[in-house]
Amino acid sequence: MKYPFKLPQLPYSYDALEPYIDEQTMKIHHTKHHQGYVDKLNAALEGYPELQTKELEEIIHDLNSVPEAIRTAVRNHGGGHINHSFFWTIMSPEKSEPPPAFAKYEEEFTKAATGIFGSGWAWIVADAAGELSVVTTPNQDSPLVQNLKPILGLDVWEHAYYLKYQNRRAEYIEAWWNVVNWKEI
Ligand code: MN
């Protein structure tokens, strides 16, 4: 993904993940929140032609080389764009089963996602050696910053579930397992 960044299309309709994730949440999440990250990321990079030719993954991976004036904006909105672009692809209305190698991470992942204080993401990541682990990141921080490759990720910002689940994050997480796209993962 390179500048100017664009909102990717969802690989399914807004109501496809019902009843687990409702249509209105998906619509607002995609067209308002994700679009907002895209717009603000583009605005941040507007005056930085040397960054416009780079892949976003590369920019995020090397945040310290981003000019300080826009580093926080790139971290938040670049992370938001990468994380959400990934998130849409690892969900599907088509029910699939986790490969045995992943089943053992489910409980740990659920616990981590439930326990995040405030806004953030839970992840299953692979390190450089291909070893899997469960980690969490605050805000829109991408695991790529720590040289970890996202394999599975869950958005636990309230905007991802509040309309349907209000404060019941644990119910949202339990429901979300039903739409995980294990084939893609
Ligand atoms: Mn989100």
Image (cartoon, rainbow, N blue to C red):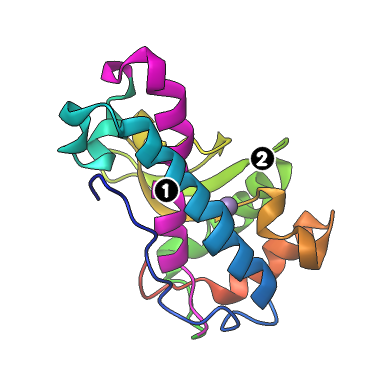
Q: Measuring from the top left, give residue 113's x and y in whole percent.
A: 65, 48
Q: Which residues are magenta?
A: 64-93
Compared to 98, does 146 lie above or below? above
Quarter-of-image position of residue 57:
top left
* Residue under numbered circle 2: 119
Mark 1 or mark 2: whose residue is earlier in sequence: 1
State how far apart marks 1 and 2 are (Cα). 19 Å
Residue type highlighted by circle 2: Ser
Q: Measuring from the top left, give residue 64's x and y in whole percent.
A: 32, 17
Label 2: few (<14), some (14–19) or many (≥20) C-alpha neighbours in 10 Å: some
Question: Which residue is rendered at x = 39% and y = 15% of the image?
Answer: 69
The kind of secondary structure element at disc 1 is helix
Q: Measuring from the top left, give residue 109's x and y in whole percent.
A: 59, 51
Closer to viewer: mark 1 or mark 2: 1
The kind of secondary structure element at disc 2 is loop
Question: Which residue is rendered at x = 84% and y = 53% of the image?
Answer: 167
| Rendered image: mark on residue 38 | 1
Q: Is 79 left or right of 128, judged from the image as shown?
A: right
Q: Nearer the viewer, residue 97 or 71?
A: 71
Question: Which residue is rendered at x = 27% and y = 25% of the image?
Answer: 62
Q: Nearer the viewer, residue 170 or 83?
A: 83
Residue type highlighted by circle 1: Val
Q: Quadrant of the C terminus?
A: bottom left
Label 1: few (<14), some (14–19) or many (≥20) C-alpha neighbours in 10 Å: many
Is residue 21 in sight in this rendering?
no
| Rendered image: mark on residue 122 | none
Q: Is residue 65 magenta?
A: yes
Q: Is 120 left or right of 54, judged from the image as shown?
A: right
Compared to 128, does 7 lie above or below? below
